[in-house]
Image: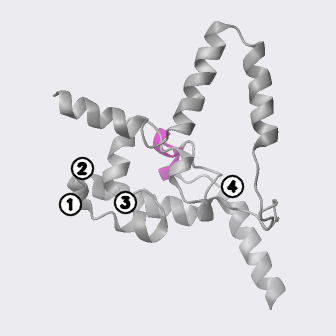
Amino acid sequence: MITLQHTEIKKSFETSTHVVGHVFKVTLYKKLFGMVSRYVLNQIVAECERVTYVGIDSSHCGCVIRTTHGLPCPCELARYVFGSIPLVVIHMFWRKLSFSNQGLSKSKVSITKETKTISKRFQELDVYGKVTLKSKLWEIAFLDLNSVFSSKKDQNKA
């Protein structure tokens, strides 16, 4: 029975990474497809339908799915209407589509190897490449200040 459940879950993971539904072919889901389960994509579709009623006002939204599931709520999704939803706004739980350990049981997770590689590549780039890489790293390092912050700043100016 456990083997059957394991096989069914693996089948679901494969479906999530390979089968594209028509709803998910729009730019909004481009960064998520194949990286999160179809269940998550369906939850986000349902929340996107609420965007027209809620807008970016978190007081009307309630942010329930953000707090209970770690998924973007309608007031957050409203900011991505003309772009695509970044993968980092999805809780890590929903991004694991395999049974492999991937080192998650280790008590210490490190990015030392990755930062050394980035630093080495940074030194090899020309000025334009350095500026581009630096801006991408800034977006990652200051996640709470990037697109959300700029949209709030634009609203305050208006």
Please state which amino acid type lies under the numbered disc 3: Glu
Q: Calculate the distance from the C-alpha at mark 2 to the C-alpha at mark 3.
A: 11 Å
Residue 105 % position (x, y): 79, 68
- The residue to which callout 3 is attached is 47
Give the mark nearest the N terminus, 2 or 1: 2
Nearest-to-viewer mark from 2 and 4: 2
Q: Residue furthest left?
A: 158
Residue 150 % position (x, y): 34, 32
Q: Residues within 10 Å of mark 3 (few under 14, many from 20)?
A: many
Give the mark nearest the N terminus, 3 or 4: 4
134 over 156 or under it: above or below: above
- The residue to which callout 4 is attached is 17
Q: Nearer the viewer, residue 22 or 124?
A: 124
Mark number, residue 113: none
Give the mark nearest the N terminus, 2 or 3: 3
Q: Nearer the viewer, residue 85 or 152?
A: 152
Q: Calculate the distance from the C-alpha at mark 1 to the C-alpha at mark 3.
A: 13 Å
- The residue to which callout 2 is attached is 55
132 over 63 or under it: above or below: above
Local secondary structure at mark 1: helix
Give the mark nearest the N terminus, 2 or 4: 4
- The residue to which callout 1 is attached is 60
Residue found at x 74% / y 77%: 8
Residue found at x 56% / y 38%: 140
The magenta region covers 23-29
Q: Calculate the distance from the C-alpha at mark 1 to the C-alpha at mark 4.
A: 34 Å
Pointer 2 with pointer 1, Cβ within 8 A: yes
Please state which amino acid type lies under the numbered disc 2: Gly
Residue 135 % position (x, y): 55, 24
Give the mark nearest the N terminus, 1 or 4: 4
